[in-house]
């Protein structure tokens, strides 16, 4: 069997002198606590602290990075544990794991393979590469490992040295799991909610009116009219802040942010409830709400994260059967400078306002995001995420952003994951790439060695703390 142990110099430069410096830079931050200010691990997992049910339920089924690649090579999503039409998948954890092992070579050269090799080796102690031949033996080993107390969620949280973990939560969420964690003296970690109101911005989507009713019940406010919706959103933002939240997150089709006057927004709100909404009105309503969310951030200081430009649910039959976040969201062309003009005109120099821009269109890094961050005090360049959270793309990001915005106007690494055990592997990947980039600046005499070590430390600590107002 092929050995699994990742190479200690992975992602470091080929040049010996540069590689030696990258090693030392990485060693200086390799064990630094993890700040994860944008992610999708549920707080209930840590609040309940139950043993993970099986290896596949932990490592494969919830991770659309993994399921989409297996689906791409012909494995049906039903066979990977995803529920079809709300009916639980009949696939066993062992058969799901076997599908991964049988298609292990599909991940060659991908960041998923890098993360898996790191977590299989460093977290679970596996010593062999997965294959069809050893699938059952590896599954048995993982299953036995997960049964031990050292592999309960809270024990792993401590082992991963996670200092801050942000979740992503609907405004109508009761935040009960966050409250339990905060009140539990045996849990010393910091888990904070992130306010995500996307589902209230699209009055043309099925279920919008029902979502308004859920929000109304949670906020104890009437959302049947537009002013009531805004009041409910403000109220829930305050509740999130009281629960420790420091940020919001918004994913929309584009960054258009033209505000409407209250009368026109109210008219469209009523039209949506009465079923007479036009496509143009839905777009105008969504862009107006993006402006209003920025306005709220300028008032309450919650950091606004924005990631437009994604084709959501590209394959309708898959969406109809399995729902959202099942691997078929795809990158779109991005734009920020013109669409964000209303927001930046009114709030771009407001000290209370902070806007972190993410993209899956890396052409916008040097053309739009870096120049915006290089002028507006409020704008920060979000780390590469999703399709761009790869070693090469992270390196391209550093080269594209640093010229115009430097290091301090960036977000720090964003793992953006539902795969809990991949968090340390993802952050280590970023730290290795940043060490390599900093080493290249030193060896070309653009940066002193002392400055490189200082920046390496800041990229994993005070830069994300400051950007996301983590304290």
Image (cartoon, grey):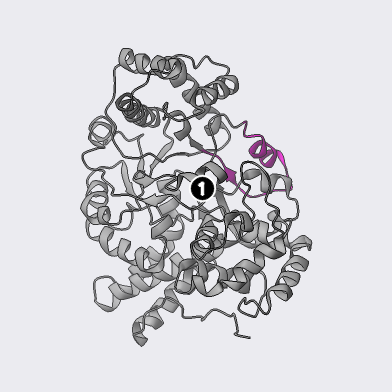
Q: Position of residue 164 (x, y in %)?
A: 55, 50
**93 vs 316: above or below:** below
Left or right: residue 275 compared with residue 406: right
Task: Identify the residue at image location x=50%, y=66%.
Answer: 73
Q: Is residue 192 magenta?
A: yes
94 inside magenta stretch? no
Q: Is residue 392 visible?
A: yes
Q: Residue at x 28, y 35 (%)?
A: 256
Q: In this picture, is 28 found above or below 407? A: below
Asked where in the image residue 56 lies, by quadrant, the reply is: bottom right
Is residue 295 or residue 89 the one in the foreground?
Answer: 89
Q: Is residue 470 visible?
A: no
Q: Is residue 396 above or below residue 412?
A: below
Q: Give the percent coordinates (x, y) of residue 185.
A: 73, 44
Percent across and percent down for residue 71 are 52, 60
Q: Nearer the viewer, residue 91 or 390?
A: 91
Helix, strand or loop status at disc 1 = helix
Tell me where the magenta segment starts and ends, as one range: 174-194
| Foreground residue among 348 and 227 | 227
Rendered-image quadrant of the N terminus: bottom right
Residue under circle 1? 318
User: Which residue is rendered at x = 45% and y = 48% of the image?
Assistant: 315
Q: Where is residue 146 drawn, in percent x and y?
A: 74, 63
Q: Residues within 10 Å of mark 1 (few under 14, many from 20)?
A: some
Q: Using residue 335 as the reference point, say whether residue 270 is left or right of it.
A: right
Q: Residue at x 38, y 39 (%)?
A: 252
Q: How many marks?
A: 1
């Amino acid at each position: 069997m092929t050995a699994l142990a990742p190479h200690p110099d992975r992602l470091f430069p080929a040049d010996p002198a540069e590689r030696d410096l990258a090693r030392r830079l990485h060693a200086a931050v390799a064990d630094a606590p993890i700040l994860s200010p944008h992610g999708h691990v549920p707080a209930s997992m840590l609040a309940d602290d139950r043993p993970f049910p099986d290896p596949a339920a932990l490592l494969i089924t919830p991770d659309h990075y993994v399921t989409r690649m297996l689906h791409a090579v012909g494995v049906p999503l039903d066979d990977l544990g995803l529920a079809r039409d709300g009916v639980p998948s009949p696939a066993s954890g062992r058969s799901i794991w076997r599908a991964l092992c049988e298609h292990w070579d599909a991940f060659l050269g991908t960041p998923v393979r890098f993360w898996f090799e790191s977590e299989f080796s460093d977290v679970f102690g596996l010593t062999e590469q997965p294959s069809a031949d050893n699938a059952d033996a590896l599954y048995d080993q993982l299953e036995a490992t997960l049964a031990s107390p050292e592999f309960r969620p809270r024990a792993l949280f401590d082992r991963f040295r996670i200092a801050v973990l942000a979740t992503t939560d609907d405004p109508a969420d009761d935040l009960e799991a966050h409250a339990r964690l905060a009140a539990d003296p045996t849990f010393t970690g910091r888990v904070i909610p992130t306010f995500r109101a996307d589902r209230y911005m699209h009055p043309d989507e099925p279920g919008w009116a029902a979502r308004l009713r859920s929000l109304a019940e949670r906020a104890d406010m009437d959302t049947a009219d537009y002013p009531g919706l805004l009041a409910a959103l403000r109220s829930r933002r305050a509740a999130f802040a009281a629960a420790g939240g420091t940020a919001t997150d918004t994913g929309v089709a584009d960054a258009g942010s033209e505000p409407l006057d209250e009368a026109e927004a109210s008219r469209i709100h009523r039209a949506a409830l009465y079923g007479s909404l036009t496509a143009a009105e839905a777009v105008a309503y969504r862009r107006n709400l993006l402006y209003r969310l920025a306005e709220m951030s300028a008032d309450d200081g919650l950091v606004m994260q924005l990631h437009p430009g994604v084709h959501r649910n590209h394959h309708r039959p898959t969406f109809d059967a399995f729902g959202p976040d099942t691997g078929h969201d795809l990158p779109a062309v991005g734009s920020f400078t013109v669409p964000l003009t209303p927001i930046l005109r009114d709030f771009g120099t407001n000290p209370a306002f902070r806007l972190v821009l993410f993209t899956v269109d890396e052409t916008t890094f040097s053309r739009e995001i870096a120049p915006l961050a290089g002028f507006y005090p409020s704008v920060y360049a979000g780390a590469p995420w999703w399709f761009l959270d790869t070693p090469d793309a992270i390196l391209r990001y550093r080269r594209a952003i640093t010229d115009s915005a430097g290091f301090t106007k960036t977000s720090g690494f964003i793992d953006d994951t539902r795969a809990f055990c991949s968090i340390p592997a993802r952050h280590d990947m970023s730290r290795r790439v940043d060490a390599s980039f900093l080493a290249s600046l030193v060896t070309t005499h653009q940066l002193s060695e002392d400055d490189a070590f200082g920046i390496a430390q800041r990229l994993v600590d005070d830069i994300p703390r400051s950007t996301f107002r983590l304290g």
